[in-house]
Amino acid sequence: MRHPMVSSPSMGEERWGWEGCNELRQEVEGHPSNLLTSSSFKKKTIMAFFKVEKLSISFGGLDALSNINFEVQEGQIFSIIGPNGAGKTTLFNCINGIYRPSRGRIVFKDREIQGRRPDKVARMGIARTFQNIELFAHMSTMENLMLGRHRYMKTGLFRGAFMWGRRSFAGKEEVANRKKVEEIIDLLDLQSVRNKFVGGLPYGTQKQVELGRALALEPQLLLLDEPSAGMNSEEKQDMIFWIKDIQDTLKVTILLIEHDMKMVMDISDRVLVINFGSPIVEGTPEEVQRNPEVLKAYLGEENAIRDIA
Ligand SMILES: Nc1ncnc2c1ncn2[C@@H]1O[C@H](COP(=O)(O)OP(=O)(O)OP(=O)(O)O)[C@@H](O)[C@H]1O
Ligand SMILES: [Mg+2]
């Protein structure tokens, strides 16, 4: 049975001065000599947007993840694939603070985030969707998306209750947040279900709402755990379109866990393959498809990979 809840960030906001780093990077890349003359420029240029270093976690005697390393550049779609039980969801749980890794570092925009609480990680700009949808089944699409706006709500429910009217601070905040949610509803084509209870919607539409709830946080890094699982081919095509649109239009960096190999190979900039919690290979989709270890690890899914090669 699906758990009728949503994991949402809490109030408050924290923004740092990442803006301008792209300009710095362009400036340095345009003038290679600068690399030699300015160590601070060099530091900004080589800094990865997101990076995982020597990450490990065990449950009892089981090493669910061992020595995972990868880097993601800003704006990329970076996919994590591997057979069932490989450790993919565990990796997301370490990133968004549900699990505390036993060893290693997770660095987002030059800040270590391993071991931070999920609401803190969300406030830093990392949102996620879940393999098993986590939404409030008895709330409407609109209400579920509004919950994703918690990061931007300075007025708590209690305080807000004493500040009625559209011209009050709470009222203005509500209007601004609704406007943002309306944009997401338009982006994901959710107009027809905006006032419907989420629990009664088809599975594919619930997945869309969950994507919308994650986007409501206005994340800079979005973790998608099997976004197209259980969808028919038409719904999958829509999901691919939206993921690309989120990358291109909203400029969001995406970590994607997905079993649909065609989708992974079509939209990923880079792919990491893990098996039994250990990394097998990391590279471009073409490099990964050619890797014999990957074909071996997938066994039953070997044909799926061959089909698209
Ligand atoms: N809280 C936990 N306690 C004990 N074992 C766990 C826990 N979380 C994950 N595991 C184990 O870690 C391993 C990796 O699980 P995980 O859910 O990350 O796999 P996955 O790659 O996401 O698989 P799937 O493709 O089926 O979703 C599994 O053996 C799982 O049973
Ligand atoms: Mg999983």
Image: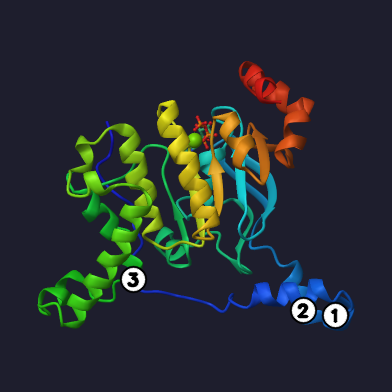
Please rate how many residues cluster around mark 2, counting C-alpha atoms within 10 Å: few if below 14, some from 14 to 19, many from 20.
Answer: some
What distance separates the C-alpha of mark 2 from that of mark 1? 8 Å
Disc tally is 3
Residue at figure coordinates x 17%, y 49% from the top left: 195
Residue at figure coordinates x 53%, y 35% from the top left: 258
Q: Mark 2 or 1 closer to N-term? A: 1
Coloring basis for residues: rainbow
Mark 1 residue element = helix
Please rate how many residues cluster around mark 3, counting C-alpha atoms within 10 Å: few if below 14, some from 14 to 19, many from 20.
Answer: many
Q: Which residue is mark 1?
A: 34
Q: Which residue is mark 2?
A: 41
Q: Can see residue 232? A: yes
Is 234 positioned to the left or the right of 114 in the image? left
Q: Mark 3 or 1 closer to N-term? A: 1
Does residue 172 sit above or below 252 in this rendering?
Answer: below
Question: Could you tell me residue 150's position as x and y percent?
Answer: 31, 65
Does residue 32 sit above or below 120 in this rendering?
Answer: below
Q: Nearer the viewer, residue 205 or 65?
A: 205
Mark 2 residue element = helix
Residue at figure coordinates x 60%, y 36% from the top left: 264
Which quadrant of the view contains residue 49?
A: bottom right
Amino acid type, callout 3: Tyr
Task: Locate the C terminus and report the quarter of the image it occupies.
Answer: top right
Q: Nearer the viewer, mark 3 or mark 1?
A: 1
Q: Nearer the viewer, mark 2 or mark 1?
A: 1
Question: Given contact means CB atoms under 8 Å apart, are the residues at marks 2 and 1 in contact?
Answer: yes
What distance separates the C-alpha of mark 3 from that of mark 2? 32 Å
Mark 3 residue element = helix
Residue at figure coordinates x 31%, y 33% from the top left: 203
What distance separates the C-alpha of mark 3 from that of mark 1? 39 Å
Q: Which residue is mark 3?
A: 152
Question: Could you tell me residue 68's position as x and y percent?
Answer: 68, 46
